[in-house]
Image (cartoon, rainbow, N blue to C red):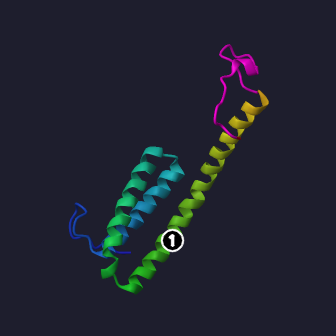
Amino acid sequence: MKRSRSSGDGAGHAPAGTLAQLLQCLQAEGEALSGGDVDRLAQAVHQKELTLRRLAGELAGIDRVELRQAVRSLRDLNERNARLLAPHMHINRVRIESLFGAARTGALYSSDRREAGPQDRPAQRGVRA
């Protein structure tokens, strides 16, 4: 996909330029996911959101064939990023479940590193497992 930027500051993009920028955002997102770089991931996601908003306003002026081709490439890259994200989500889900499971079974420890009994743990109000 070729870039068609009319300026370096992001203003005045043609739809093709915005699509190219969206592709770059998804690539940066994938690199951040692969590298486990949370700060870079946050930047990439923010930039992607801004680019999607700009693209939404430009869709009326885009060639349908060009749009279909770009969407196909973008969809493939976005699906790849989702596959990269899935293991992180699974790990976090397992960690959360283990914390709740530990709280239910009493396998938590007190501040002196001994196993804490129910009397040592604060009451959890409003928490449903």
User: Tag 1, which secondary structure?
Assistant: helix
Location of residue 82 with respect to 123 vertically, above or below: below
Q: Which residues are magenta?
A: 107-128
- Is residue 67 shown left or right of residue 106? left
* Residue at the image point whose x is 31% and y is 72% from the top: 57
Taking the magenta stretch, the answer to whether it contains residue 118 is yes
Quarter of the rendering containing residue 120 = top right
**Residue under circle 1?**
75
In terms of depth relative to the viewer, which is nearer, 46 or 25?
46
Q: List x then y, in percent, for residue 34.
A: 53, 52
**Looking at this rendering, what residue extends furthest in the right direction?**
105
Q: Amino acid at mark 1?
A: Arg
**Looking at this rendering, what residue extends furthest in the top direction?**
112
Quarter of the rendering containing residue 10 = bottom left
Q: List x then y, in percent, for residue 44.
A: 41, 54
Mark 1 closeness class: few <14, some 14–19, many ≥20 residues within 10 Å:
some
Classified by dominant secondary structure, the portion drawn in magenta counts as loop
Location of residue 34 with respect to 98 vertically, above or below: below
Q: List x then y, in percent, for residue 45.
A: 43, 55
